[in-house]
Image: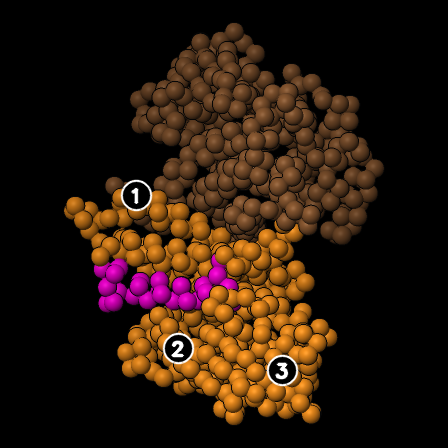
Amino acid sequence: MSFILSEDEQMLRDAARGYLAESASVSALRSLRDSKDPIGFSRDLWASMAEMGWCGVLVPEEHGGVEMGFAAAGVILEEMGRHLTSSPFLSTAVLGATAFNLSGTDAQKSEYLPKIAGGEIVIGLAIDEKARHKPEKIDTRAVKDGNGFRLTGAKRFVGCGAGADLLIVAARTEDDKINLFLVDPRANGVTRTDRRTLDSHVPADFQFDDVKLDGDALLSGADDSEQAYRQLLDAGRAAQAAESHGVAVQAFETTLEYLKGREQFGVSIATFQGLQHRAAHLYGELELSQSLVRRALTTLDTQPSQSPLWCAAAKAKATAVSRLSTAEGIQMHGGVGMTDEYDIGLYYKRAQAAGEFLGDDAFAAGEVARLSGY
Amino acid sequence: MSLETFRAETRAWLEQNCPESMRKPIRSEADICWGGKNWTFASDDQRIWMERMVEKGWTVPTWPTEYGGGGLSKDEAFVLKEEMKAINARSPLDSFGIWMLGPALLKFGTHEQKLEHLPKIARGEIRWCQGYSEPGAGSDLASLRTKGVLEGDHYVINGQKVWTSYADQSDWIFALVRTEADKSKHEGISFILVDMDQPGVSTKPIKLISGKSPFCETFFDDAKGYVKNLLGEPGQGWTIAKYLLSHERAGIVSEASFGGLNPVTAAHQSGEVDENGKLEDPILRGDVARLTIDGLAFDATMRRVKEEADHGEGVGARASMLKYVGTELNKRKNELNMSALGSDGLLWEGENETDGDPARSWLRSRANSIEGGTSEVQLNIVAKRVLGMPSA
């Protein structure tokens, strides 16, 4: 377990940085926004990511993936954060693949993991039922019906929901345990409502009215379904933290460059101590965030039993720091920071939305307290 | 010897040689062994533990054996540290000689200087203090005015130092002295080792808001500093001082990391937890959680920076970032300790078994972001040297 990127990870980072700058940069997000794209991401981009092997980053080789691990997925996500890339990578390649890895039966893995690695499906993970993340507060019910189930309930804020081909839905079974179910978003009884968020993504809300599911819709491969559910959320938090951290770092670098180029009173404003101290403080916060993100991801790969605390800490810190970095970015840009023309505002918006997903810093800090025994 | 063999042997040796009472958490200042001519051991065990570790060279594990060290590799020293931690073994000897002067002597000293001074540091025979700041030279350290005039084999030194930690209990002082009157501000300073056991050197403790006096004023009135005890070249003092400051910053930072009282323990002491050990005040609980997060982040960052330094990326000016973050964190921890303790935290003398320790520690922590370069100085360094922001 190292804080330093391996050679493979460095190559992956360089490739991702180059590719995303070219094909999925901030201008790509702007055009998705301005054209009111119905799903908020590009399916062509997703196909290219599959060709590069990214979609299979967590898929075992036997199922057609490259299985590089969470640390490598984090490398990609950080670059996506830097470029504000909108894609199903987190929802599908990370959360979808992890759900199958942890909870899928052999048959389910064989059917779906190759499709994930091949970029053939987009998955939406349906957890939240309230506006604030409360993963134990699940009222959606899956009731036994013959060999299958009947699903009833409502979900909010499903990432990539508008473009999802498959939903993984958290629902309580009759033993009151939380389990995960595969649901076709086009099935009878499913109502989808697209929600356009401030970061130009298009998550969706879903209503399930007595939706009929086959028996093999239940992800039944885990010994303890709730333990697997918590592990999935931990992994998702660390991964989301990596993207948030990328948002924070790029906002900082862009702002620093702006400070060095901007002149007032006949001098570069980067010479002003008031701005230097704000920037230097932010640099320290970014270093802290970076260490926790990397630590959480490498711990998921090498010592999963130790990972809950690190994942919660990373989520809390990366959320707070990305919001601070982008907010400071606007302040230090001055008036132009408030304009749509400059990118810093887009980073501010993404930091807010990404921070909310799977629990904001207040939620994650509560997890840290609970896991620390106080 | 493989690391695993080294680990096994080290574990066995520690098990055999570390006295039981030296495996308990430090309760007060007296439990820290500083050594020196004036040192009175707090217990026989403290003396025995130091002597046994001195014998192995493990008070300074990575220094060469000819200078009193253990000659261990970095990896072996890390194993030793881990094994000591595993049995909660106390540090056998702490001193500014070990943390600060030693590394500078190893880098800039002649063989004779090393032979003369390093073994005495390693064995805890000589206690050192640092003569840097002056009444008129704080953050602007290079404007110092203590003057040394060459007379044959020695310099005649006159001037005053301030904030010299534990000068009243020290035997020697390493001091920055202006010896080159015709040179510029930074190039006129030399780094001289001065024996304090002479009529020309006197000290006076400064009483702090914590009620304690860890700092002194130190006066030089025609004091003698021998040429053979000048480190490096005349006028090279600023370079050496900067090198040494980075070690001082590392020392302050490791002090700041999470030893001692923490807010959760404090809340248990003051009865602010429910039957499940949960902090009852939800806002305090949130504040403590954010402290825990930053504590984990800071420890991880220390490890990351160390790892990157080993890969040749160097710590460099990032030491200033660590110093800033670590000391601000320690202040926050102390503030939350006081909050968790409530009115128990206000007790000062004789009223509780800890004799006002939490309050004194809280007060002392305010100095963390002043000593070794203020937080504002660290931010200046980060802005200029890490972020490349230009000077006005």
Tell me the magenta residue range: A336-361
- Is-magenta flag for residue A224? no
Total number of numbered discs in the rendering:
3
Q: Earlier in the sequence, mark 1 or mark 3?
A: 3
Q: Which of A150/B153 is in front?
A: A150
Q: Amino acid at mark 3?
A: Ala
Q: Chain B in the picture: what colour?
A: brown
Q: Is residue B170 above or below residue A172?
A: above
Main SS, magenta region, reads helix
Q: Is residue A185 above or below residue B132?
A: below
Measuring from the top left, give residue B310's x and y in whole percent. 55, 51
Q: Earlier in the sequence, mark 2 or mark 1?
A: 2
Foreground label between 1 and 3: 3
Q: Amino acid at mark 1?
A: Gly
Q: Amino acid at mark 2?
A: Arg
Which residue is painted at 58% across and 55% down in the image?
Answer: A368
- Report which residue position mark 1 lands on: A274
Mark 1: give few (<14), some (14-19) or many (20+) Cα within 10 Å: few
Which chain letter goes with mark 3?
Answer: A
Measuring from the top left, give residue B163's x and y in whole percent. 47, 22
Which residue is painted at 59% across and 41% down in the image?
Answer: B263
Measuring from the top left, give residue B103's x and y in whole percent. 55, 34
Q: Secondary structure at mark 1?
A: helix
Q: Earlier in the sequence, mark 3 or mark 2?
A: 3
Mark 2: give few (<14), some (14-19) or many (20+) Cα within 10 Å: some
Quadrant location, the C terminus of chain B: top left
Residue A195, numbered circle = 2
